[in-house]
């Protein structure tokens, strides 16, 4: 059981991935308008939904998850946290969005699979392979679900940056913000956070953060992400 902000808890079903830095970073990066309707693409057991509900008490989050096991875990987390009115999970392939989702959401979020599928990846869990969630699939789903002017936030590996920006451009999603994240000061970039806007004008802002300084001490950015400001 993981403890989250605002007293929420995350129950992880057997075989589920633990609460990750990826999810914490993404939830911290997301900026929502008041009363936002959010779609979490590949929502797993509801981690991002819980974090966003804790971050903004006015938002509602719909999770879309292909795995029945993860979906069942999300339903259990919704029940345990009494979030039935604000958080929901639908077991469905994001490559086939419900018709009523078209142009409905203010914001989409995703912590997607990072690794390419194929025979060589058969031993990798499906939650980490893009067989059913390629960048093209992901951006088509986000573009279809977003209202004009809505934002898509995701976390990914830096080596996929060019592909992600290209997929965004092909689906009316303009890259607006790029955050480069290093695990340690002076180390390589390990993660990227991207914000795209549906119908947005060209103009990309770039910033960089480290999680730990050269001595291995958590930075102020890390403390913000993990809600440690008062410690």
Image: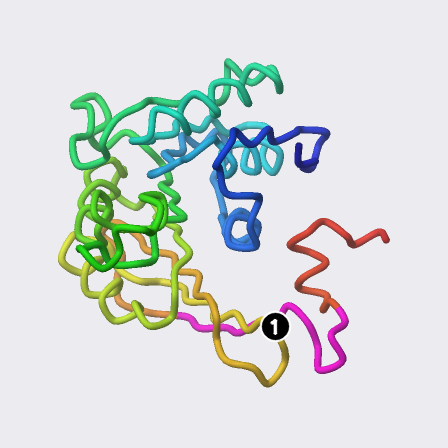
Residue 114, image x, y percentages = 34, 57
Q: Is label 1 in a helix, a strand or a loop?
A: strand
Residue 169, image x, y percentages = 18, 60
Residue drawn at x 59%, y 28% is 11
In the rendered structure, the answer to whether residue 39 lies left or right of residue 208 reads left
Residue 163, image x, y percentages = 22, 66
Identify which residue, 45 or 200, lies in the foreground. Answer: 45
Residue 209 vertical position relative to residue 156 in the rendered view, above or below: below
Residue drawn at x 31%, y 58% is 115
Identify which residue, 69 or 97, lies in the foreground. Answer: 69
Residue 63, image x, y percentages = 38, 29
Give yes or no for residue 213 being in the magenta stretch: yes
Decide whether the magenta segment is chiefly helix, strand or loop: strand
Q: What range is drawn magenta here? A: 205-217
Residue at the disc numbered 1: 210
Tell me the quadrant of the picture where the N terminus can be found: top right
Residue 113 vertical position relative to residue 2 in the rendered view, above or below: below
Residue 185 lies in what quarter of the image? bottom right
Identify which residue, 190 or 59, lies in the foreground. Answer: 190
Residue 192 vertical position relative to residue 64 in the rendered view, above or below: below
Identify which residue, 125 or 76, lies in the foreground. Answer: 125
């Amino acid at each position: 059981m993981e403890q989250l902000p605002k007293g929420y808890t995350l129950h992880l079903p057997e075989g589920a991935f633990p609460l990750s830095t990826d999810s914490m970073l993404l939830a911290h990066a997301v900026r929502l308008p008041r009363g936002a309707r959010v779609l979490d693409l590949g929502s797993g057991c509801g981690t991002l939904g819980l974090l966003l509900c804790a971050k903004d008490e006015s938002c509602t989050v719909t999770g879309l998850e292909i795995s029945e096991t993860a979906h069942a875990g999300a339903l259990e987390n919704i029940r345990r946290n009494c979030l039935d009115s604000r958080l929901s999970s639908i077991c469905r392939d994001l490559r086939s969005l419900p018709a009523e989702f078209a142009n409905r959401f203010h914001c989409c979020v995703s912590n997607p699979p990072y690794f390419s599928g194929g025979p060589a990846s058969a031993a990798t869990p499906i939650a980490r392979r893009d067989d059913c969630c390629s960048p093209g699939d992901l951006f088509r789903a986000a573009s279809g679900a977003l209202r004009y002017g809505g934002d898509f936030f995701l976390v990914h590996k830096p080596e996929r940056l060019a592909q992600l920006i290209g997929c965004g451009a092909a689906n009316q999603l303009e890259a607006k913000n790029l955050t480069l994240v290093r695990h340690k000061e002076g180390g390589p970039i390990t993660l990227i956070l991207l914000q795209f806007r549906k119908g947005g004008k060209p103009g990309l802002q770039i910033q960089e953060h480290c999680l730990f300084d050269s001595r291995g001490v958590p930075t102020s950015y890390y403390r913000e992400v993990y809600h440690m400001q008062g410690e």
